[in-house]
Amino acid sequence: MPSFQLASREYKKEDTVIHLGTAAVGGGNTLIIAGPCAVENREMMLELAPVLKDMGVHVLRGGAFKPRTSPYSFQGLGEEGLRILNEAGRCTGLPVVTELMDVRDGELVYRYADIIQIGSRNMQNYTLLREVGQMDKPVMLKRGLSATIEEWLLAAEYILAEGNQQVILCERGIRTFETYTRNTLDVAAVGAVKNLSHLPVIVDPSHATGRRELVAPAAKAAAAAGADGLMIEVHPNPGKALSDGQQSITPRELAVLLKMVRAIDHALDRSRVHY
Ligand code: PEP
Ligand code: MN
């Protein structure tokens, strides 16, 4: 018996399917999340959102509270960023996802977000996990920088145990000895999690690689591995991005990538995949 229970395949055989607006994730449904690392200004979000929607993106992302390594880096626009993201979502009909970093901002982020993101650095912030476990909105739980698969699923268990069954797992690379890439995409974790758990698992090839030229190959590998979706950082002008420009791709590059991902999904006939 694994140490996690509610998250396990033994506890629930069928894939958990989470509905987000008109889209869904899990059970053969592939979810595409895209948007800038951080919400930078209103014009950019209002211009970018409809472009992404036309490409078939299902969920708009954008950080308002950014967990930056340096305290001197851009920290996000805070509530103003949440308002802008929410407006861009409402204008296009796209659900929005944004990170909740601090339990004190729980109500604020809940008000503006459709999906609450728990970032890697907070994967084992158990107070925060319990807080979102009591919310009635889906939670996207990113894998910790150095977390094992079991620790990650136990973090999900905290959310499930509080009553929130809508948990989406997100593999975003783990820290290894390799420094050429920002992190190392653990592509085998996708299959492992799908065997161990009924929860949907998506992949973030942007943070996993840290290099825009590696986003497409990593995304294709994730799709081929059976990931339930992708989260990709997109910026109209990556060279000018206030955060993570080096790993951001343009909307045009995303359009090309999504065609390839759809071809892979089609070849796999995901609706027939059973674990
Ligand atoms: C992000 O998705 O904006 C982010 C900060 O990612 P991570 O928590 O995986 O580093
Ligand atoms: Mn980022």
Image: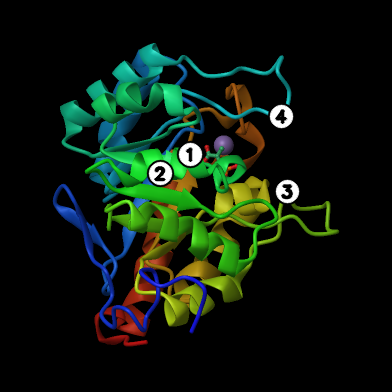
**Who's the residue at 41% across and 75% down the image?**
197
- How far is the residue under mark 3 from the one under mark 1? 28 Å
User: Do callouts 2 and 1 mark residues in contact (Cβ within 8 Å)?
Assistant: yes
Image coords of residue 145 (percent x, y): 67, 51
Question: Circle 3 is placed at which residue position?
Answer: 182
The disc, 4 or 3, on the residue closer to the chain's N-terminal end is 4
With respect to residue 120, does 154 lie above or below? below
Please tell me how crowded label 1 is: few (under 14), some (14-19), or many (20+) other residues with Cα within 10 Å: few
- How far is the residue under mark 2 from the one under mark 3? 29 Å
Q: Amino acid at mark 4?
A: Thr
Q: Nearer the viewer, mark 4 or mark 1?
A: 1
Question: Circle 4 is placed at which residue position?
Answer: 69
Residue nearer the viewer, 178 or 218: 178
Q: Amino acid at mark 3?
A: Arg
- How far is the residue under mark 4 from the one under mark 2? 25 Å
- Note whether residue 187 is visible: yes
Residue nearer the viewer, 9 or 246: 9
With respect to residue 53, does 113 lie above or below? above
Question: Circle 1 is placed at which residue position?
Answer: 127
Quadrant in the rendering for residue 188:
bottom right
Please tell me how crowded label 2 is: few (under 14), some (14-19), or many (20+) other residues with Cα within 10 Å: many
Q: Amino acid at mark 2?
A: Arg
Residue nearer the viewer, 100 or 48: 100
